[in-house]
Image: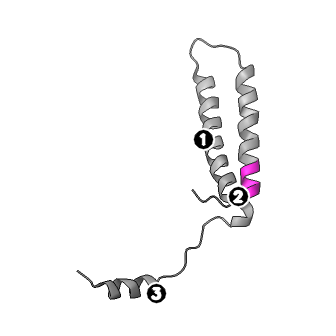
Amino acid sequence: MDSYETIQELHNSLPAFSPYIPVALLPYIALVLLSSTFTLAFYFSTLPKDALPVRETAVATTASILGGFGVVALFCSAGVYV
């Protein structure tokens, strides 16, 4: 097993973390995703009731995924890195 000094040197030689998505774009991404979520939620509430709720399930799942990523983008843009 390596010594602490060796591991510390390896850690110090690694490049700094660089996100794939620029931090400056996060507020806009959050706005788009959360606006889409609210739009789909309104659309979901106006759908007619079907015997097999396939379309309702697809709309609700899409809205849920967009909302989840939108909240994470909003938190990250506010400085709460989750």
SS for callout 3: helix
Question: What is the CA distance from the residue labelled 3 to the residue labelled 2?
Answer: 30 Å
Compare marks 3 and 2 and give the one earlier in the sequence.
Answer: 3
Instruction: Tell me the amino acid under the disc marked 3.
Output: Ser
Residue 13 placement, left or right of 38:
left
Which residue is painted at 76% across and 34% down in the image?
39
Q: Which residue is mark 3?
A: 13
Instruction: Tell me the amino acid under the disc marked 2.
Output: Ala
Q: Which residue is mark 2?
A: 78
Q: Residues within 10 Å of mark 3 (few under 14, many from 20)?
A: few
Say which of marks 1 and 3 sits in front.
3
Count up the numbered dots: 3
Range of the magenta residues?
A: 26-31
Which residue is painted at 77% across and 55% down in the image?
28
SS for callout 1: helix
Q: Looking at the image, which residue sits at the far left?
A: 1
Question: What is the CA distance from the residue labelled 1 to the residue labelled 3?
Answer: 37 Å
Above or below residue 4? Residue 48 is above
Q: Which residue is mark 1?
A: 65
